[in-house]
């Protein structure tokens, strides 16, 4: 189940997505999900993967049982999470501690109370007994050959209330043999300067090896984690994409990227940082959440440039407006085309799309003016690369790319007194010299129109059979005519290997949808390598 790490033990990257991350509202992981995420995290190269709390619920118990048989880890060690023994007993007799051993995990993380009020009110025991619970549980697990980390829950709040007792918990864990004592900002209320000062003091006063676990309630979890590293922490606990309870945890990906690219620490096996964007998105797919487009380093907008001034500088040297080369984290630079675009934006976007504008200043100028004119009317090209490419090709080649000519289209929505709803569309077009009339029904007027267009075109272009409309968005733009306001439609289409977006704008949603559909199918044929009609 586990394999030795390629890295030394001087610095730990510890992931707790499968436990802490799973506490996010909207995430409900199956055992299969947890196994899949564990494989992704191991592929990324983290040192430790906290799998959950065996014995506390059947799902986590099953996860550890299956992980023994189904996961071959190349980089990480699997960690079981649990608590110190109950008051008034011994670790050897505690059923929850036994479940940790039975999980098969060779590394165990224990949560311990380090805030005096929590000891007295939540555990309902004495401060001395709590110290004994920590020491006894750590010693027992070490005697059983396990590596032990101790999470000091609510440490920073406890330190503020009673610093000597908080440090006594750290000493109890460390002196009993804990490999790392993790200081937890459980409520997420600390700021970087506060974290750095406390970690430095605790390190000097206890001599324990320290780690950091930061929640993001002030929006400072990543900064707090790095501040703890600055103060001497050598173990960071994070979750993929920052998933976690309330607003989340320290995000694994910017923490690791900062450590490797800004601090110069090799905390992942060689070459794994380039997999970061892929891993982030893969885990988002498993938990069924849309990847955050604006997430640092791995978001699709992390290296996207819109302003014309930025594009002009990037054309000279990309480093002028990028803090790293996006390829270092497996991402790419993108140029966004909008009414802010200048000549450099268009030239760089053309290069990105594989269209050589050949330094034609007149052509580039026409495209710039066309984009600004269209965006003033309500179009948006930063979210519709396919429509922009069609516009660019039309200007470069002197005429629009044509695979078919539309004679007319019509879509009808009918509600009958008997409760029956009917949606029917008819499309009349010419393709390769043939006039085609196609009618189709759908579950709405736009769906009926899409089906009719597909029926008409697939007779001539069978390549369209593999196209699927995968997303459809409607936005009513500002206007003064109430229901006559301008409508913008964005459509995303896939051919099974890639996805593209197109835009349509009109005074009604059906006409705007038609424009976006026309572009979607035209671009699909271009992408399939089909020659335009004569």
Image: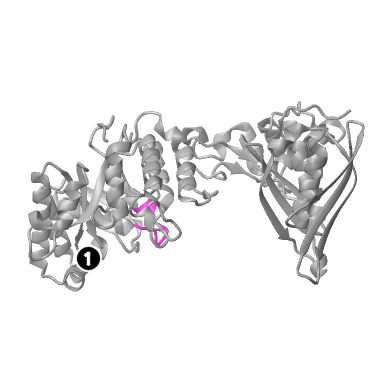
Magenta-drawn stretch, dominant element (helix, strand or loop): loop
Can I make out residue 43 in this image? yes
Q: Is residue 204 left or right of residue 309?
A: left
Q: Residue at x 26, y 63 (%)?
A: 154
Q: Nearer the viewer, residue 299 or 361?
A: 299
Percent position of residue 96, x then y: 18, 56
Q: Is residue 507 left or right of residue 232?
A: right
| 100 part of magenta stretch | no
At mark 1, the secondary structure is helix
Magenta-tinted stretch: 215-224
Percent position of residue 392, x then y: 78, 36
| 220 part of magenta stretch | yes
Q: Residue at x 34, y 64 (%)?
A: 189
Circle 1 is placed at which residue position?
158
Image quadrant in which you'd find residue 399: top right
Q: Nearer the viewer, residue 17 or 118?
A: 17
């Amino acid at each position: 189940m586990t394999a030795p790490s390629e890295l030394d033990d001087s610095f730990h990257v510890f992931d707790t997505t499968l436990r802490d991350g799973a506490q996010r509202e909207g995430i409900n992981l199956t055992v299969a999900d947890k196994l899949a995420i564990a494989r992704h995290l191991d592929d990324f190269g983290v040192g430790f993967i906290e799998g959950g709390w065996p014995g506390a619920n059947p799902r986590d118990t099953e996860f550890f049982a299956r992980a023994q048989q189904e996961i071959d880890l190349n980089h990480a060690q699997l960690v079981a999470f649990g608590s110190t023994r109950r008051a008034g007993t011994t670790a050897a007799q505690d059923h929850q501690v036994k479940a940790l051993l039975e999980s098969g995990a060779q590394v165990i993380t224990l949560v311990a109370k380090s805030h005096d009020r929590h000891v007295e009110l939540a555990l309902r025991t004495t401060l001395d007994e709590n110290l004994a619970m920590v020491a006894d549980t750590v010693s027992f697990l070490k005697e059983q050959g396990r590596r032990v980390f101790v999470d000091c829950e609510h440490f920073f709040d406890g330190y503020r209330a009673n610093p000597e007792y908080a440090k006594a918990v750290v000493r109890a864990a460390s002196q009993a043999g804990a490999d790392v004592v993790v200081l937890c900002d459980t409520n997420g209320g600390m700021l970087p300067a506060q974290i750095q000062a406390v970690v430095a003091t605790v390190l000097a006063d206890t001599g324990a090896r320290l780690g950091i676990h930061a929640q993001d309630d002030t929006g400072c979890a990543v900064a707090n984690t790095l501040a703890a590293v600055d103060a001497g922490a050598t173990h960071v606990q994070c979750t993929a994409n920052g998933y976690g309870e309330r607003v989340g945890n320290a995000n694994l990906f910017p923490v690791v990227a900062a450590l490797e690219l800004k601090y110069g620490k090799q905390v992942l096996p060689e070459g794994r940082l380039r997999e970061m964007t892929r891993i982030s998105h893969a885990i988002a797919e498993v938990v069924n959440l849309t990847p955050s487009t604006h997430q640092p380093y791995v978001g699709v907008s992390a290296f996207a440039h819109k302003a014309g001034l930025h594009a002009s500088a990037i054309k000279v040297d990309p480093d002028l407006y990028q803090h790293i080369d996006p390829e270092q984290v497996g991402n790419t630079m993108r140029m966004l085309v909008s009414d802010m675009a200048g000549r450099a934006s268009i030239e760089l976007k053309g290069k990105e799309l594989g269209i050589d504008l050949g330094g034609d200043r007149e052509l580039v100028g026409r495209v710039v003016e066309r984009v600004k004119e269209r965006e003033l009317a309500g179009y948006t090209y930063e979210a519709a690369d396919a429509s922009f490419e069609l516009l660019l090709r039309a200007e470069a080649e002197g005429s629009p790319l044509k695979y078919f000519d539309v004679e007319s289209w019509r879509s009808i929505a009918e509600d009958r007194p008997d409760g029956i709803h009917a949606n029917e569309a008819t499309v009349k077009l010419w393709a390769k010299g043939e006039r085609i009339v196609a009618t189709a029904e759908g579950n709405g007027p736009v769906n009926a129109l899409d089906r009719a267009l597909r029926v008409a075109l697939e007779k001539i272009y069978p390549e369209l059979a593999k196209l699927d409309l995968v997303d459809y968005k409607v936005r009513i733009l500002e206007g003064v005519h109430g229901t006559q306001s301008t409508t913008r439609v964005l459509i995303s289409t896939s051919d099974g290997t890639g996805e593209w977006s197109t835009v349509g704008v009109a005074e009604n949603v059906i006409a705007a949808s038609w424009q976006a559909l026309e572009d979607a199918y035209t671009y699909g044929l271009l992408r399939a390598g089909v020659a335009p009609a004569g």
